[in-house]
């Protein structure tokens, strides 16, 4: 069975703090993809990153960074020096085989000024 | 990234009427599109996979006669909520898969349906 767990339902931080959003996944497939999406209050989902199962290199994009560790089946997302505009719900997702996406339950991030 | 446009972004209708939501891929051809439903403060629930030129594949528990999906062209899929009831009120989101590899999903803006 495939599953994505985002244990943090809601996180509140003060602006400029760093914050890490956790994502743990389960799959028996050896080839799979992991994603992070951002859903701001307006509702649309914004693609942030895709990582395939054979690429464990961490990635940094501006204030965003991702830590993929197959040994712990985790794909965590860190925002450095958070800003109010980062306030949103963040979804981690897993895709393999049939290309269906399995979404986590999301983590609501509130960045306070 | 690729652009997926969804229309209307919000709609209010009376109970018993039908509502059609359109999902268009603007700058790429999408042989497969996906329809999701999202309840307030909850995750996305996959309703069905829309395949161009063939019948949609519905997830377990989703009524195919209630949620009609048509994918007549490579750039357009439609979801029609038939005989809508208040419990059908929700946020409906379509997405299309990119063309490379497993491809990331690109999402439409979503359509908020309120049934009175």
Image (spheres, grey):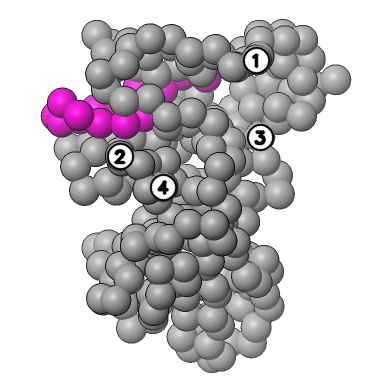
The disc numbered 4 marks a residue on which chain? Answer: B
| Marks 4 and 3, how far apart at CA | 24 Å
Whether A76 is drawn above or below B27: the answer is above
For numbered disc 3, what is the local secondary structure?
strand
| Callouts 2 and 4 on one subunit | yes
Q: Nearer the viewer, residue B103 or B55?
A: B103
Residue visible at 47% across and 80% down in the picture: B80
The disc numbered 2 marks a residue on which chain? Answer: B
Disc assigned to residue B101: 2
Sequence-wise, the earlier of marks 3 and 1 is 1
Q: Which residue is mark 3?
A: A88
**Span shown in magenta:** A21-34
Residue visible at 47% across and 71% down in the picture: B76
Pointers 3 and 2 in contact (C-beta within 8 Å): no
Disc assigned to residue A62: 1
Q: Nearer the viewer, residue B68 or A96?
A: A96
Q: Which residue is mark 4?
A: B98
| Relative image position of residue B45 (x, y in whole percent) | 40, 53
> How many residues crowd mark 4 within 10 Å: few (<14), some (14–19), many (20+)?
many
Residue visible at 77% across and 10% down in the picture: A16
The disc numbered 1 marks a residue on which chain? Answer: A
């Amino acid at each position: 069975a495939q599953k994505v767990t985002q244990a943090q339902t809601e996180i509140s931080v003060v602006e400029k703090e760093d914050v890490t959003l956790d994502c743990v996944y389960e799959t028996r497939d050896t080839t799979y993809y992991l994603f992070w999406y951002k859903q701001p209050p307006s509702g649309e989902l914004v693609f942030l990153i895709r990582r395939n199962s054979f690429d464990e290199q961490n990635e940094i994009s501006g204030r965003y960074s991702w830590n993929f560790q197959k040994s712990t089946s985790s794909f965590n997302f860190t925002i450095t020096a958070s800003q109010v505009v980062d306030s949103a719900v963040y979804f981690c997702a897993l895709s393999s085989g049939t290309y269906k996406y399995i979404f986590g339950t999301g983590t609501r991030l509130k960045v306070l000024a | 990234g690729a652009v997926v446009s969804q229309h209307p972004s919000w709609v209010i209708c009376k109970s018993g009427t039908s509502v059609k939501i359109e999902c268009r891929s603007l700058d790429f051809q999408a042989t497969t599109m996906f329809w999701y439903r999202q309840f307030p403060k909850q995750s996305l629930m996959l309703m069905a996979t829309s395949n161009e030129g063939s019948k949609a594949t519905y997830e377990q528990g989703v009524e195919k006669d209630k949620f009609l999906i048509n994918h007549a062209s490579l750039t357009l899929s439609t979801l029609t909520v038939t005989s809508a009831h208040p419990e059908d009120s929700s946020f409906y989101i379509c997405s299309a898969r990119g063309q490379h590899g497993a491809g990331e999903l690109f999402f439409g803006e979503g359509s908020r349906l309120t049934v009175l």
